[in-house]
Amino acid sequence: MATNLEASEASALARSKAAAAAAAAAAAKKAVPGSFMNTAGYQAGSGSLLDQFNAETATLLAETNADFAQINDLGTQNDALIADLGTVDPVTNVVTSPEIAIADTAEQEGKTAALAAGGDVKIYGADPLAGVTVVNPIDAATKDAYALMEAQFSQWGIPEAATFFQQQMQNNIGPNEALVLLRNQPFYQARFAGNTARLAAGMNALKEADYIALENQYSNLFTSYGVQNLATKEQFATLIGSDIAPTELNTRLDLAVTQVQQADPTVMSTLKQFYPNISTSNLVSYFLAPDETLPALQRQVQTADVGAAAIQAGLTTSQSSAAALAAYGVTYSQAQAGYGKIAEVLPASQKLSAIYGAQTGINYNQAEGEAQYLENSGAAALEQQKLKDLEGAQFSGKSGIVGASAAAGYSGSLGQQLQGKI
């Protein structure tokens, strides 16, 4: 603005000096002695000419003063505009104060253009607003909305979403469309990776609030079973992407922690024997793997329970035989009771089989005992009874049920001995 004033002042000064020079020349001519210019007629004409010149000079000076007044007014308005704009960042050249309204800027630009178009004053130099970004006003309600967004996105674990959302709103994008755009951002998809997996599997994505609520339930379950180290965003995403409900997670954790880790060590060792891909270190993770369905995991644990009960009774076991009994519905407690009975009768039954096997074709072994005491097989029970009857007949000289009845007829120690063998 100083350049504009200096240029206009120089122009006015030059015009004033020219007028003064012309007046001085006219006066000199008037004072020459003996000249015809000393006549009354010439003097009158010269006076009229000088008056006219003085009037024109006065008019010119008035116009110049008016130009100065306009320039000063423009400078005052520009100073006020800059004051309204506030602080301009010297690096980004962005106005940091939101006080200026766009209408004020438009009005000032109109005045500047009108003054320049008049031709009397030329506007030199750059536009004082050139390169300055004027930020739209932010009212209290908008500030509150931004604060709420920042709080919400922080709870979601993606605070950077607040800046993204604000940019969309400043670009006149509505909140619904902005949310759609947000869900396509890499940082959002990384945070809610479970939804990405669900969509890929043909399931619906969960709302953010529902997603986070599931994470909280998962976290509480991991903590209750003492495996809170597994409560990670990655683990949550796997569970959500596989549509594993909290109730199912609770069952899986109960299998791994309560029924295996905290059970008799024989159960754990038998499980590892039957399923070598399971180790102590990754036991819980194995039970959380989506590829392993819950029914399959339950069968594996039940199979290990049956096998462990056999080992605890001093008997042998195999994955196939234990799995068959588990499929039959034999529980851990039932297996313990059944194998306890088998261990009690098996030695005597095997001896009788060795004695009478050729005669009867009976070979009472552990498998026969499992059929009798774990599967309630009547045929296995009859085979054991037949061996007892044969053994009892040796003492009575009779066979079968008759021998057993005869033995029952004896009294004293002999009768008790015979009845114990039959």
Image (spheres, rainbow, N blue to C red):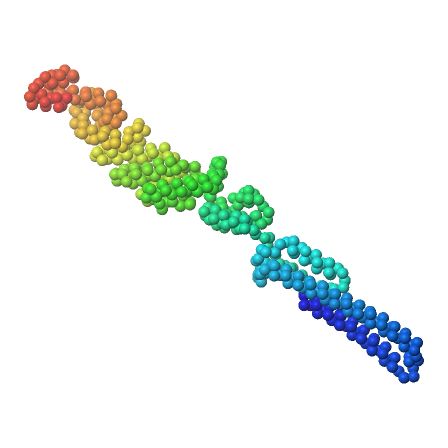
Q: Which residue is more in the foreground, 217 or 65? A: 65
As displayed, is residue 331 above or below residue 419?
A: below
Instruction: Specify the farthest residue to the bottom.
Output: 33
Residue at image position (48%, 46%) is 152
As displayed, is residue 132 above or below residue 382?
A: below
Instruction: Specify the farthest residue to the top.
Output: 402
For residue 84, side relative to residue 286 (left or right):
right
Residue at image position (82%, 69%) is 56
As displayed, is residue 290 above or below residue 86?
A: above
As displayed, is residue 413 above or below residue 70?
A: above
Residue 34 appears in the figure: yes
Instruction: Please provide percent x and percent y for residue 359.
Output: 19, 20
Instruction: Please provide percent x and percent y for residue 84.
Output: 61, 59
User: In terms of image quadrants, where is residue 320?
Assistant: top left
Instruction: Specify the farthest residue to the left.
Output: 412
For residue 149, side relative to residue 260 (left or right):
right
For residue 223, side relative to residue 368 (left or right):
right
Quadrant showing the C terminus: top left
Residue 286 appears in the figure: no
Q: Which residue is more in the foreground, 198 or 317? A: 198
User: In terms of image quadrants, where is residue 286?
Assistant: top left
Residue at image position (17%, 25%) is 352
Instruction: Please provide percent x and percent y for residue 65.
Output: 74, 67
Q: Which residue is more in the foreground, 193 or 155? A: 155
Quadrant showing the N terminus: bottom right
Instruction: Please provide percent x and percent y for residue 190.
Output: 47, 46
Residue at image position (31%, 35%) is 301
Q: Which residue is more in the foreground, 178 or 118? A: 118
